Image (spheres, rainbow, N blue to C red):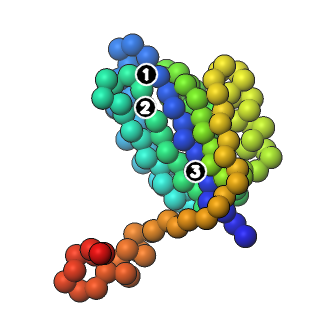
Amino acid sequence: MTEPIVFVSHFRIKDGKLDGLKQLFPEVLEMLEAEKPRTTAQLAYLDDAGTKVSIVHVFTDADTMDLHFRGAEERSRAAYEFMDPAGWEIYGTPSDAAMQMMRQAATSAAVALTVHSKYLGGFLRMQSDLNADSSPGDGGARS
């Protein structure tokens, strides 16, 4: 059975670099959306102070995470002009290669890597699922 993987990356934004990050991010998202079609979600959240950003990645399985990680070193170099790693979380069981890469990255950056590998279950609604579930006139609402 394939299990979804959620990967959350946390970063500290370098002093004076928030505006540059805000300019870079839409370009990166556009590129990732085009080049990584199997990545289910990539969502970025900025804290209220504008000093930290967390990026939530969702993958349907370990193979999809591996595909997403291809080229990550180059993307990271560009992003690290604006921010520094503050830690990573993995929910699910990635491939051995992805785990090795993340362990090395965490050690190199001297940040925590937290792994919750035991998937208990759950669901993820895709936009097409939401459209199929809504009946005419209810606006997709569920009670």
Q: Which of the two discs, 2 and 3, labels the residue nearer the N terminus?
A: 3
Label 3–label 1 contact, CB within 8 A: no
Picture residue at 73% right of the left edge, 44% below the top: 98
Lateral position of residue 14 relative to residue 48, left or right: right
Q: Secondary structure at mark 2?
A: strand
Q: Which of the two discs, 1 and 2, labels the residue nearer the N terminus?
A: 1
* Residue at far left of view: 137
Indicate the quadrant containing the C terminus: top left, top right, bottom left or bottom right.
bottom left
Label 1–label 2 contact, CB within 8 A: yes
Q: Looking at the picture, tell me which residue is in the foreground, 130 or 32.
A: 130
Picture residue at 43% right of the left edge, 17% below the top: 14
Indicate the quadrant containing the N terminus: top left, top right, bottom left or bottom right.
bottom right
Q: Looking at the picture, tell me which residue is in the foreground, 143 or 140.
A: 143
The kind of residue on which mark 1 rests is: Ile
Residue behind mark 3: 6
Lateral position of residue 76 relative to residue 131, left or right: right
Q: Secondary structure at mark 3?
A: strand
Residue 60 at x, y percent in the picture: 60, 62
Residue 11 at x, y percent in the picture: 50, 27
Q: Residue 53 shows which numbered tag?
A: 2
Q: Residues within 10 Å of mark 2 (few under 14, many from 20)?
A: many
Picture residue at 47% right of the left edge, 49% below the top: 42
Looking at the picture, does residue 77 appear above or below residue 61? Answer: above
